[in-house]
Image (cartoon, rainbow, N blue to C red):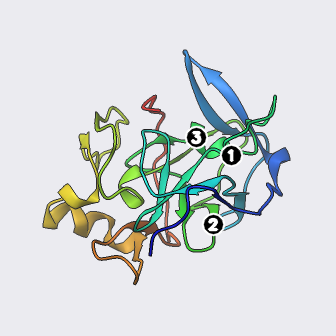
Amino acid sequence: MSMSTSAVLELDVENDSQIEVRDNDGFKGVFATEDISEDSVVFILKGAITSRPTMYTIELGRNQHLNFPKTRQDHDDLDYCWQYLNHSCGPNGYMDTVGRTFRAARKIRRGEEITFNYLTTESVMAAPFNCVCGSPNCFRFIRGSNFLTREQRLLIQPFVITHPSMETPVFSIQRQTGNLNNSFSSSR
C-alpha cells in the first residue's frame, strides 16, 4: 500500500512542557525539562507521511516515512522534535510507530538528552554513519536493520516488535525491563 505524499498525521504534541529542543556543541537534541516516567508518552509523532526516506524521516512502515509538513511555522520545533532525536545504541526512549508516539524506555531524568536507536525504525538508512555513542553494545556503523547480523538482531530482539505488514521487518523498541545506558551522539 503506497501512502500519498500529502497525508498528514492529525495528532498534537501533548506533553511538550516536559521536553525542549536544545543546541549542544553545534548539534540540536531533545532534552527532558522534568523527570519522565518509564513507559510514558514523551510526545506524539506529528508530520506528513511520505513514501520516500530521507536523512531526517522516520520509517513507520513499508513505504511510510514521517516527514515534515510542506509548510512550517516559526517556532514549531517542539511539534516536530522527532527530527532532533539523536541516535544511541543504548537509548532511553523508543518509537511506537504503530501508536505514532515516542515513549520513555526507562525513567528519564530532568536535563538528560532523549535518544533512540535508529536501527529500531530504519530498515535502510538514507545517510549511514559511524556511531560514537559509547554504549557497551554499540553497533559501530549504523546503516539500517537490514544489515544487522544474526547476533546483532539478537541484541535488540528483546526490545523490538515486527510490523506484520512489513516484507522486511522494521523494528520498534518495546517496553524495557531494566536500565538502559544513555549516551549523547550528535549524529542528526
User: Label 2: how many residues lie within 10 Å, few (<14), some (14-19) or many (20+)?
Assistant: some
Numbered disc total? 3
Please identify, in this view, whether the residue under mark 3 or under mark 1 is nearer the observer: 3
Label 2, label 1: how many angstroms apart (C-alpha)? Answer: 23 Å
Residue at which label 2 appears: 100
Q: Position of residue 107 (x, y in %)?
A: 64, 57
The answer to whether marks 3 and 2 mark residues whose Cβ atoms lie closer than 8 Å is no
Question: Mark 3: which secondary structure?
Answer: helix
- Along the line of sight, which residue is nearer the eye, 78 or 103? 78
Q: Position of residue 95 (x, y in %)?
A: 54, 61
Q: Amino acid at mark 1?
A: Arg
Q: Position of residue 167 (x, y in %)?
A: 29, 76
Please identify, in this view, whether the residue under mark 2 or under mark 1 is nearer the observer: 2
Kindly indicate the quadrant of the structure image that contains residue 76: top right
- Along the line of sight, which residue is nearer the eye, 155 or 179? 155
Give the numbered dot on residue 109: 1
Give the numbered dot on residue 129: none
- Along the line of sight, which residue is nearer the eye, 75 or 35? 75
Question: Mark 1: which secondary structure?
Answer: loop
- The quarter of the picture where the N terminus appears is bottom left
State left or right for residue 24 relative to residue 86: right
Residue at which label 3 appears: 83
**Where 176 sits versus 182, above or below?**
below
